[in-house]
Amino acid sequence: MNEIRKPKRIINSVAPIRICDIGGWTDTWFAGHGRIFNIGVYPYAEVQIAVYDKDAVNDRIVINAENYGQRYGIDPEKYSSERGRVRHPLLEASIAIMELPQDQAYEVNIFSEAPVGASTGTSSAVSVALIGGLDALTPGRMSAHQVALTAQRVETELLGGQCGIQDQLCAAYGGINYIEMHHYPHASVYPIYIPNETWWELERRLVLIYLGKSHSSSDVHKMVIQSLEDSGADSPQLEDLRKTAPHARDALYEGDFAALGRSMVENTEAQGRLHPALISEDAVK
């Protein structure tokens, strides 16, 4: 009978997905600067890391991607040379960017109830939860802000994708946040604290509807960038979006849900002017 090896340590890490990205698209490199309001919500991206002695298991790092039913070993030191053959680029790149102790072995379990490509920052939540969990294995501790920026670097620098900074910041900080990006990717995050009564009413009123179709956010970014080639960071479309986040922030502080709803409508209309592909035809039927 095979011996069941018990981990010597287990690390659990979670990160919320993002809704209400009011002012979204002004958190990108092509916008340069921006203002964003968003809310971190359940279901969380969940990561569990089991730590073993290196000699106790066959593979030093094992990924268990529960949503895909895939379990396999990797060597993060070979990530750069084998980049074209990885199974889950986001997961493997997030592990590769962290300098994990060589004298230990790890089994990394990842799960999320939120659908991939549902416009809720799911991939960012996964990478933030994973990097945050792995950070517990390394000397020192990263701040929430550093975890977010590291996750953003994974998507842009290691994977060559297009993304802003708000999804990672929302996943790292959680709760309700107002974000001011002074100059990409540098930003200040201002958590919004409201009375419990306002929280409860906000939860009662907000509904997230998934239309059953996924999309590639990086591909949508490319279309928006092409449409802004001539107008640049100070385009009227981006200026309109920058105005929406302060309206949402102020409305919530005042407990004015009608005004908050108007800021959402204002944001949706401004996104449509930025690029028509940002508004799903199914959503407006």
Image (cartoon, rainbow, N blue to C red):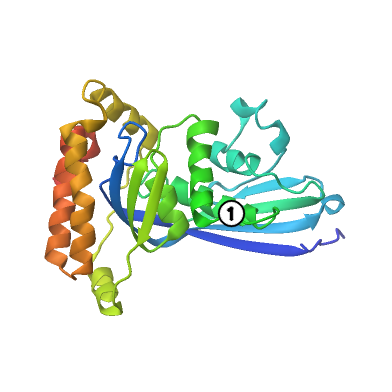
Pick the front one: 17 or 39: 39
Q: Is any atom of residue 210 visible in this view?
A: no
- Point 26% across, 21% down: residue: 229
Q: Amino acid at mark 1?
A: Met
Query: Measured from the top left, where is residue 137 in percent x and y?
Result: 69, 55
Q: Label 1 belongs to which residue?
A: 142
273 above or below 229?
below
Query: In the rendered picture of this protein, how many numbered marks are placed on residues?
Result: 1
Q: State left or right for residue 78 relative to residue 285.
A: right
21 above or below 207?
above
Query: Measured from the top left, where is residue 17 in percent x and y?
Result: 40, 55
- Point 57% across, 38% down: residue: 88
- Point 28% across, 47% down: residue: 35
200 above or below 161?
below
Pick the front one: 194 or 211: 194
- Point 12% across, 56% down: residue: 262
Q: Is any atom of residue 100 visible in this view?
A: yes
Query: Measured from the top left, where is residue 232 in percent x and y?
Result: 25, 26
In the picture, the quarter occupied by the N terminus is: bottom right
Pick the front one: 270 or 212: 270
In the picture, the quarter occupied by the C terminus is: top left
